[in-house]
Image (cartoon, helix red, strand yellow):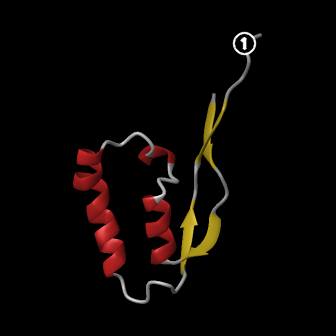
Amino acid sequence: MAVSETSPQDWAQSPAEVVERYRRRDYLGLWDIDEARWAAEVEPVVDRLRALPDQDRPRRRVSRNPLMVFERPR
């Protein structure tokens, strides 16, 4: 198995867009969160995002994702 990272992914996204994606639970890690955990862990993040100035101004974002390559046994 080889482990690496993808090339940097670069895009623009506003705080309001991120809040909406959290609200819709677009991110896989949010699908199964119960209401108590949502209130304790997600709502504070959403509140901080909503507190940012210029809610509709896109910000540059850059991310890399882990990349794993598996070999089939011979």
Residue displayed at 29% across by 71% down: 47
Residue displayed at 56% across by 68% down: 62
Q: Position of residue 29 (x, y in %)?
A: 44, 45
For mark 1, give the secondary structure.
Answer: loop
Say above or below: 7 vs 17. above
Residue at the bottom extreme, as displayed? 54
Foreground residue among 1 and 47:
47
Residue ID for mark 1:
73
Foreground residue among 9 and 35:
35
Neighbor class of circle 1 (other Cα within 10 Å; few <14, some 14-19, many 20+) is few
Q: Position of residue 52 (x, y in %)?
A: 35, 82
Snapshot quadrant of residue 31:
top left
Snapshot quadrant of residue 48:
bottom left
Q: Position of residue 10 (x, y in %)?
A: 63, 69
Tell me which amino acid carries mark 1: Pro
Residue displayed at 72% across by 12% down: 73
